[in-house]
Image (cartoon, grey):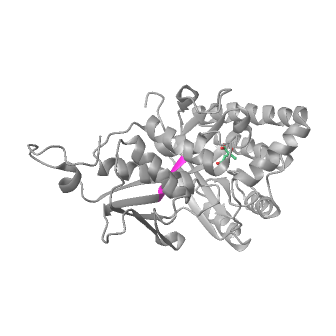
């Protein structure tokens, strides 16, 4: 495919007429259990956050400047040619190449996002996914979720060094996923399963307000694992066992059991050295206010924690988290998912 008009005889030039302005969105995500251990080939479960999204809108360039971006939520505007090494510039060039677009088109991309950056909610992967979808729409291409996930994975790899692939997967498929990486560096699609959830449950997601780049705790843990691999492998095994137990609890609707498993996962994340005083405080506050379970979520050292709540205690826990200094508290209902879907 190219960005040239299809042919002189074509009844409609889709690229320059029908699809002049295209937009797309992608959700944020939350890791329910298994973060970090998933990088070391243990299973993890992630959930899409349907109502917290990133958007990308592609329209013809308004000036003669070529390809440009504006990201008002991040306070940024730039020209691709002026910042070719910007991660989104590099990614856009890769996506256009994958779409078969030969000459750099004159387009303007506007990116907006309600997902806080460096918070464990998948902001980078969601922006990249929305951008791929919007560009694919603009050029009339149909990409599968696997293809989108694979493109975004390469971007994640550039940004984070050694991502497991769970973030791009849950965001591209927008479904609860069981993710288990194989012994390779790229994420094979066979390691992804869509898990049944017998009964809906509510999570509160509280932001510490501390921003921590994903690659920092991952790199730190990697160095400690290299020095004492047997100890860390044993901790990863325990996290993996919890992921299996969480999957069983979700399948049978045992919400109280799910809460205890989340608590145990948090203790293991503390032992892995990826929690922080702010995260531990919010976890404790949620538990004291009656949450069934609570843990940090994502890479840690900052970002968000989650708390499993019933309808009766939801408000009390949310108020307690806010009083303890959470900068934002979101509630998300994880809907039931049937086995066959
Ligand atoms: C980040 O959302 C989850 C981590 O396990 C990293 C990864 O899986 O790529 C910390």
Residue 313, visible in the rendered structure: no
Q: Is residue 52 magenta?
A: yes
- Examine the rendered structure and indicate whether residue 140 appears above or below residue 115: above
Residue 291 falls in image quadrant: bottom right
- Examine the rendered structure and indicate whether residue 139 appears above or below residue 20: above
Q: Is residue 117 magenta?
A: no
* Residue beneath the point at 36% across and 61% down: 57
Task: Pick the residue in front: 179 or 109.
Answer: 109
Q: Estimate the x, y position of residue 257 in percent, counting from the top left.
A: 70, 39
Task: Pick the residue in front: 2 or 59.
Answer: 2
Task: Pick the residue in front: 97 or 267.
Answer: 97
Q: Estimate the x, y position of residue 91 in percent, counting from the top left.
A: 50, 51
From which residue to which does the magenta span run? 48-53
Q: Estimate the x, y position of residue 130 in percent, counting from the top left.
A: 43, 53
Residue 244 falls in image quadrant: top right
Task: Pick the residue in front: 252 or 105.
Answer: 105
Within the displayed image, which quadrant is ligand 1 positioned in?
top right
Residue 43, visible in the rendered structure: yes
Give the main secondary structure, helix, strand or loop, of the magenta stretch: strand
Question: The N terminus is located in which quarter?
Answer: top left
Q: Estimate the x, y position of residue 279 in percent, counting from the top left.
A: 76, 60
Q: How many marks can you see? A: 0
Question: The C terminus is located in which quarter?
Answer: top left
* Residue beneath the point at 64% across and 60% down: 118
Residue 314 falls in image quadrant: bottom right
- Examine the rendered structure and indicate whether residue 299 appears above or below residue 119: above
């Amino acid at each position: 495919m190219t960005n040239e008009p299809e042919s002189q005889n074509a009844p409609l030039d889709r690229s320059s007429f029908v699809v002049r302005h295209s937009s797309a969105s992608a959700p944020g995500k939350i890791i329910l259990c298994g973060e970090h251990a998933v990088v070391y080939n243990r299973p993890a479960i992630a959930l899409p956050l349907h109502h917290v999204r990133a958007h990308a809108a592609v329209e013809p360039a308004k000036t003669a400047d070529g390809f440009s971006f504006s990201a008002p939520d991040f306070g940024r505007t730039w020209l691709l040619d002026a910042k070719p090494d910007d991660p989104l510039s590099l990614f856009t060039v890769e996506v256009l190449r994958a779409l078969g677009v030969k000459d750099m088109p004159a387009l303007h991309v506007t990116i907006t996002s309600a997902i806080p950056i460096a918070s464990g909610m998948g902001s980078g992967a969601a922006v990249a996914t929305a951008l791929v979808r919007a560009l694919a729409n603009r050029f009339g291409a149909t990409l599968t979720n696997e293809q989108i996930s694979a493109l975004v994975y390469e971007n994640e790899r550039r940004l984070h060094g050694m991502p497991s692939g769970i973030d791009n997967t849950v965001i591209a498929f927008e479904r609860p996923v069981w993710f288990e990486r194989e012994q390779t560096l790229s994420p094979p699609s066979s390691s992804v399963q869509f898990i049944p959830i017998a009964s809906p449950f509510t999570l509160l997601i509280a932001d510490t307000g501390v921003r921590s780049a994903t690659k920092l705790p991952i790199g730190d843990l990697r160095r400690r694992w290299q020095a004492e691999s047997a100890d860390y492998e044993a901790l990863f095994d325990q996290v993996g066992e919890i992921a299996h137990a969480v999957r069983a609890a979700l399948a049978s609707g045992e919400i109280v059991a799910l809460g205890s498993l989340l608590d145990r996962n948090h203790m293991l994340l503390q032992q892995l050295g990826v929690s922080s005083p702010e995260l531990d405080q919010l976890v404790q506050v949620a538990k004291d206010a009656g949450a069934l379970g609570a843990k940090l979520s994502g890479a840690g050292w900052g970002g968000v924690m989650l708390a499993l709540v019933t309808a009766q205690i939801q408000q009390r826990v949310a108020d307690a988290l806010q009083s303890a200094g959470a900068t934002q508290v979101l509630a998300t209902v994880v809907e039931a998912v049937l086995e066959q879907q």
